[in-house]
Image: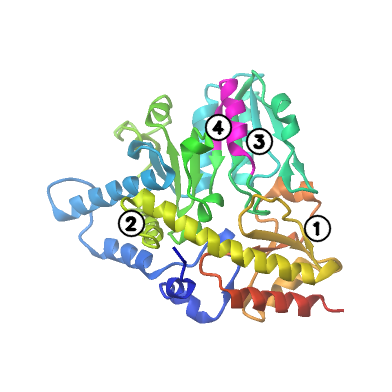
Amino acid sequence: MSFDVHAFRAHFPSLTSGIAHFDGPGGTQTPRPVAEAIAATMTAPLSLRGAELPSERNAERVVAGFRSAYADFLAVPERGVVHGRSATQLTYDFSRHLSRSWDPGDEVVVTRLDHDANVRPWVQAAERAGAVVRWLELDPETALLRMDDLDETITARTRLVAVTAASNLLGTRPPVRAIADRAHEVGALVHVDAVHHAAHGLVDATALGADFVVCSPYKFFGPHCGVLGADPALLETLRPDKLVPSTDVVPERFEFGTLPFEALAGATAAVDFLAAIAPSSTRRASLEAAYRAVAEHEHALLTRLTDGLAALGDRVVNRSRATDRTPTTLLELPGHDARAAYRFLAARDVLAPAGAFYAHEAGLALGLPESGGLRIGIAPYTTEEEIDRLLDGLAAFTTP
C-alpha cells in the first residue's frame, strides 16, 4: 500500500505549529487517538483492579489490553510483557535481577554502539558481582561493530550480552541475530535494546534471538513509559525483591506499585494507531503491513536527504555510513559547532538537535567534539518539504 503522509499528519495537532520535527529519535509527537485514550481512561470510573464494579473492571481491561498489544508488537506471549517507567529503569531492574547469579570471573559483553542505558546498568552490575566486562568495538569509519572480534569477545564465561537493535545516534542496525546466536552457543542470555529500532522496524523477539527486549512507546507516538518482553518461563526463574503482600505472579512480580493505567491505555493506543495504517486480518499482520508502508516512505525521504547532503560537499560530514540503518543521520559540520547549527535551524522552525544523545561510548569512539553532532531523525510524519527546508537551512548555515 502507499503511505499518505498528509492524511497521517492530520492526526497530530502539534504539527500545525509549523515546526519541522527531526527530533523523533528523542521522542515523537503525539497523535490525537493516543491522547484521547489517556484522557478517556483518566476520566472514566477507575480504581484499583477488581471484578465487582465498573471502575475495577476498567482497570483490569486496561492492563489486559496493554499486555495483548505489546505481545503483538514484540512477538512475545502476553505473560512476558512487563511495564516499566522507562527502558532505562527496566534495564537497571533486570541488571540487578540477573546479576544475582553472577560470580567473580563471569563475563558480560556490551558494545560501543549502544545508548548508555544498555551499557552502564550492565557494567555497574558486573562491577558489583566481580564479573569481567568485555566490549564489542565500534569502527568509526564504517559506523559498524567489529564483528571479526565476536568469537573472542563472547566466551564460555559470558553470562549476558547486551546489544542494540539500532543505534539512536547513527541509525546503524548491527547483526543482532548473529551476535545472539554466538551468545546462545555458550549459554549466555541476550538483552536487546529495541528502543530506536521499534520506531522504524517491527520487533520480533524470536527473530532477533532476544531473551529480553525493551522498547519505549514514546518513540512511536505513545506516552512516556517502557516495555520489556521475554519468555514467561525465563521470567519465572528470576526472583526480584518485592513487597511481601504484592503478587508473585509473572509478569506482575516485576512491576512495583500500582500501575499507571492511563499510560498503559496510551501505550496500547499507540500500537493500535500504527496498526490502523494498514488494517489486515490480525493486529500483528496489520503492524507488519504498516511498517512496510512507512519504511518505503522513510527510505525515499532518507534518499532525498542523503543526496541533498552530498550536494553540500565537504561542508558536512555524514557519520551514518552503515548500509543497514534507520532513517537517522548524524552530521558533523567542519569549522562549526553543532549547537550553533541547532540554534540556527531552530530560528527557522526546524528542530534538529545537537549532542551525543546518551550514546556515550559511541560518541567517544567517533571522536565527537563536546557539542556532539547534529542528529537528523526522519519520522513517518516527515515530508519532502521539511527535508528541503532542512537542507536549505544547512546550506545557509555552512555558506562561508
Describe the element under mark 4 as helix, strand or loop: strand
For mark 3, what is the residue? Answer: 110
CB under 8 Å between callouts 3 and 1?
no
Dot 2 or dot 4: first in sequence order is 4
Near mark 4 (Cα within 10 A), the count class, few <14, some 14-19 or many ≥20, is many
Mark 4 or 3, closer to the camera: 4
Dot 3 or dot 2: first in sequence order is 3
Q: Residue at x 70, y 48 (%)?
A: 360
Q: Is residue 312 above or below residue 288?
A: below
Dot 3 or dot 1: first in sequence order is 3
Circle on res. 369: 1
- Magenta segment includes 95: no
The quarter of the displayed image where residue 230 is located: top left
Q: Is residue 335 left or right of residue 200?
A: right
Mark 2 or 4, closer to the camera: 4
Bounds of the magenta segment:
174-191
Q: What distance separates the C-alpha of mark 4 from that of mark 3? A: 10 Å
Hey, what amino acid is under mark 1?
Pro
Dot 1 or dot 2: first in sequence order is 2
For mark 2, what is the residue? Answer: 265
